[in-house]
Image (tube, rainbow, N blue to C red):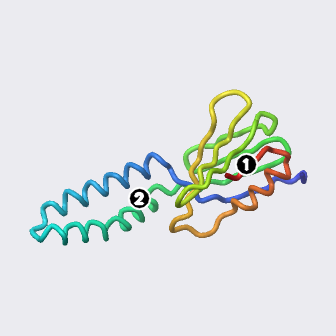
Amino acid sequence: MKSNSQTFQLSTLHRGKYMFILLTSILFIGMGMSKVPVQEILKIIIALLMIPFALYLAIKLSTLSSTWILDEEVLRISNAKKTVVFPLSSISYIRNLKRSGGNLIIIHPVKGPAFRTWRNKLFQKEDDLPLLSEALRAADIEYYDL
């Protein structure tokens, strides 16, 4: 690996905030539609058409882009809220689990709990995950793309 550090931008989400906003939005859509004085079939159709808006709103409000910096000794993950540093020698392996709408990236250290981050692909421009994957493999880190 080069002596220079490599920087990668990933579109990530605050998972708890995302789920809270999405589920709360769906709850409010359901409550609002129960008050509308139209036939039940129209209520159902309108509610179903509003779900993509709730999904878009949840993603936009919980976006938490992250910067991954990989150098010879450490992997540093930073976002607006915190920075996490993993010495490369302490990483057992990294799993990239593909999910609908994104990826769940799990870093398993040799000791201690795993670190999880959610990469979002919905309503986002292309990010640097393919380049990050190549760089992690080049750094001799076990990387599983499942």
In front: label 2 or label 1 = 1
| Residue located at (41% from left, 58% from top) | 58
Residue in the image at 85% along x and 52% along y:
138
> How far across and how far down the image is residue 78, in percent?
64, 48
80 or 140: which is nearer to us?
Answer: 140
Q: Secondary structure at mark 1?
A: strand
At label 2, the amino acid type is Ala
Q: Residue 58 got which mark? A: 2
Q: Residue furthest top?
A: 111
Disc 1 designates what residue? 144
Left or right position of 88 against 60: right
**What separation in Å lies between label 2 and label 1 (alpha carbons)?**
29 Å
124 horizontally vs 88: left or right: left
Nearest to N terminus: mark 2 or mark 1:
2
Q: Position of residue 109 (x, y in %)?
A: 71, 34
Can you give x and y, in whole percent of width and height, for residue 128 in the image? 69, 62
